[in-house]
Structures are given as structure tokens and as C-alpha cells.
Image (cartoon, rainbow, N blue to C red):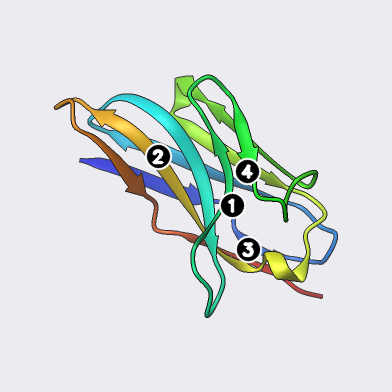
């Protein structure tokens, strides 16, 4: 069993900041890439930021310069620092991990999602 648990969502004012965390636990052999996705009401889920096991990052154009993804491999945790938040950042944010289980199965896992609301 593998679990991804997100935290850190909530309400922020425009221009404010939030930091999301996602801890991966369970029968893990190794974690490859990790990422954050988001889904706003009535829209498809979209990639926000992605980080490889080597620390190479990739961002959606809409968040470049405002969001920063990072990971702590010792803690099996990925973070998303969100600054200069805008109302259009409002969405449910999901953590994703591409990993190898102890049984040597390679697959994607998803967290349950955490709500981020940006409003004055």
C-alpha cells in the first residue's frame, strides 16, 4: 500500500502565499518524479509543477515565477511554495508520485487533493 497525504491548503488573499506539502508513505522502493496538479470547477486537471528525482523542475506557464516546487528525498516529501497568488489559482491541488513499489511495480499514485481558495 502507498499513500500520498497533502496538507497546507486553505484560504489566501490575492497576492498572498501558501505552502503545500505531500508526504508519500508505504511500500516504496524508490520515488521517481513527483508533481502537483490542480483542477478548478468545470475544468480539466492540469499540471502545475513537476520535479524529477534529480531535481529538474518544470512549471506551467501560468505559475512560472510565482510557484516553486521542491522535494526532500529523505522525507519522501514534495512541496509547492505558492507566492503572489491570484484568484485564478483557486482549485483543488493534487500531489502525484511516479514510483516503484517494494514489489517492483512502477505506477503513478495520487493524493486525495487539498483545496486552495484565493479570494479577498
Residues marked 4 and 3 touching at CB (< 8 Å) = no
What separation in Å lies between label 4 and label 2 (alpha carbons)? 14 Å
Residue 118 rendering spot, x and y as whole percentages: 72, 68
Specify few, some or many for label 2: CA neighbours under 10 Å numbering under 14, 14-19, or 20 or more. many
Are discs 1 and 3 less than 8 Å apart at CB? Answer: yes
Measured Cα–Cα span from mark 4 to mark 1? 9 Å
Q: CA distance from mark 4 to mark 3?
A: 13 Å
Q: Residue furthest right?
A: 15
Task: State the residue position of label 3.
Answer: 10
Which one is earlier in the sequence, the residue at label 2 or at label 1? 1
Mark 4 or 1 closer to N-term?
1
Q: Are marks 2 and 1 in contact (CB under 8 Å)?
A: no
Which residue in the structure is indicated by mark 1? 8
Q: Residue at x 53, y 48 (%)?
A: 36
Q: Which secondary structure, mark 1?
A: loop
Label 2, label 1: how far apart the Cα atoms are: 18 Å
- Where does label 2 land, which residue? 97
Q: Image height check: is 9 above or below 3?
A: below
User: Label 4, on which residue?
Assistant: 80
Q: Earlier in the sequence, mark 4 or mark 2?
A: 4
Can you give x and y, in whole percent of width and height, for residue 81 in the image? 69, 43
- Placement of the C terminus among the 4 image quadrants: bottom right
Q: CA distance from mark 1 to mark 3?
A: 7 Å
Of marks 4 and 3, the one in the foreground: 4
User: In front here: 15 or 67?
Assistant: 67
Residue plotted at (40% across, 28% down): 32
Indicate which disc, 4 or 3, sits on the residue closer to the N terminus.
3
Amino acid at each position: 500500500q502507498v499513500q500520498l497525504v497533502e496538507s497546507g491548503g486553505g484560504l489566501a488573499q490575492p497576492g498572498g502565499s501558501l505552502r503545500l506539502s505531500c508526504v508519500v508513505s508505504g511500500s516504496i522502493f524508490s520515488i521517481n518524479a513527483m508533481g502537483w496538479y490542480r483542477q478548478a470547477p468545470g475544468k480539466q486537471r492540469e499540471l502545475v509543477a513537476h520535479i524529477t528525482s534529480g531535481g529538474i523542475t518544470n512549471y506551467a506557464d501560468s505559475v512560472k515565477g510565482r510557484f516553486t516546487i521542491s522535494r526532500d528525498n529523505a522525507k519522501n516529501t514534495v512541496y509547492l511554495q505558492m507566492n503572489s497568488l491570484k484568484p485564478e489559482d483557486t482549485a483543488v491541488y493534487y500531489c502525484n508520485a511516479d514510483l516503484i513499489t517494494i514489489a517492483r511495480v512502477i505506477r503513478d499514485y495520487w493524493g486525495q487533493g487539498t483545496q486552495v481558495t484565493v479570494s479577498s
